């Protein structure tokens, strides 16, 4: 392993959206800042994710890598809120919602509710997605990093593919840890993003 480390800050994406430019920094921050994340990945993800065989490019461990990405999106979704308008009067338990009212859903609360995700809802545990989203929580629609229903993000499949490829190329070749200069301060705007950027120490393996 190289003995050189580099302080690194990921630039913000110039346009609103949820793609690899937003998620990769969160994934690397989570991986670099949680001992449990590093331990889980050491055990469950092969040291080589991308394997070259003549002219073929094969991926191994992609299921585990997908689980890591899903867990990062659960803890740090791209947007803090999603909203829906009631097209007719709706009654939710004892709550009456009139027609035309905008309903704002706080994804951070939804994604970390122990009633939905279990007692470790606030912990990094990619293994919860071993049996898919339906096996990770008691109500599958409680997982909505790309939204749900007819308004779900049309680019989610492309974003997931981009993240898999980028992380598959980076993780076997570099180690990541948080820089002492990193300040954890999520900013709630149109997107959920780090207020002071992401600062990591990267070492070549």
Image (cartoon, helix red, strand yellow):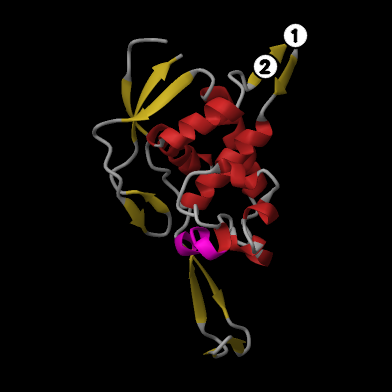
Residue lying furthest front in this view? 119
Q: Locate residue 52 relative to residue 104 in the image: left or right.
A: right
Q: Find disc 2 in the rendering and name its residue.
A: 51
- The residues colored magenta run 107-115
Residue 68 in sight: yes
Which label was assigned to residue 54? 1
Identify the secondary structure beneath mark 1: loop
Q: Quadrant of residue 52?
A: top right
Point out residue 63 in the picture as x, y percentages from the top left corner.
68, 35
Q: Quadrant of residue 33?
A: top left
Q: Is residue 104 magenta?
A: no
Q: Is residue 109 magenta?
A: yes
Point out residue 169 in the picture as x, y percentages from the top left corner.
56, 23
Prevalent SS, magenta region: helix
Q: Locate residue 96 relative to residue 185 in the image: left or right.
A: right
Image point (44%, 22%), residue name: 175
Q: Quadrant of residue 182?
A: top left
Label 1 and label 2: CA atoms lie apart by 10 Å
Q: Residues within 10 Å of mark 2 (few under 14, many from 20)?
A: few
Image point (60%, 47%), residue name: 128
Q: Which of the pair 15/195 is nearer the observer?
A: 195
Point out residue 190 in the picture as x, y percentages from the top left corner.
42, 59
């Amino acid at each position: 392993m190289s003995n050189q480390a580099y302080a690194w800050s990921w630039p913000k994406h110039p346009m609103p959206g949820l793609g690899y430019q937003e998620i990769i920094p969160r994934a690397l921050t989570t991986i670099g800042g949680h001992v449990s994340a590093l331990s889980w990945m050491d055990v469950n993800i092969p040291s080589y994710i991308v394997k070259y065989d003549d002219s073929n490019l094969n991926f191994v461990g992609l299921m585990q890598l997908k689980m890591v990405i899903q867990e990062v999106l659960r803890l740090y979704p791209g947007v803090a809120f999603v909203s829906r308008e009631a097209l007719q009067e709706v009654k939710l338990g004892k709550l009456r919602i009139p027609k035309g009212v905008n309903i704002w859903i706080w994804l951070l609360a939804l994604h970390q509710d122990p009633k939905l995700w279990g007692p470790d809802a606030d912990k990094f545990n990619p293994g919860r997605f071993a049996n898919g989203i339906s096996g990770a929580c008691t109500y599958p629609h409680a997982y909505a990093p790309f939204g749900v229903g007819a308004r779900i993000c049309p680019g989610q499949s492309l974003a997931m593919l981009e993240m898999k490829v980028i992380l598959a190329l980076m993780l076997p070749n570099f180690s990541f840890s948080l820089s002492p200069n990193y300040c954890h301060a999520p900013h709630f705007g149109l997107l959920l993003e780090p207020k002071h950027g992401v600062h990591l120490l990267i070492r070549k393996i």
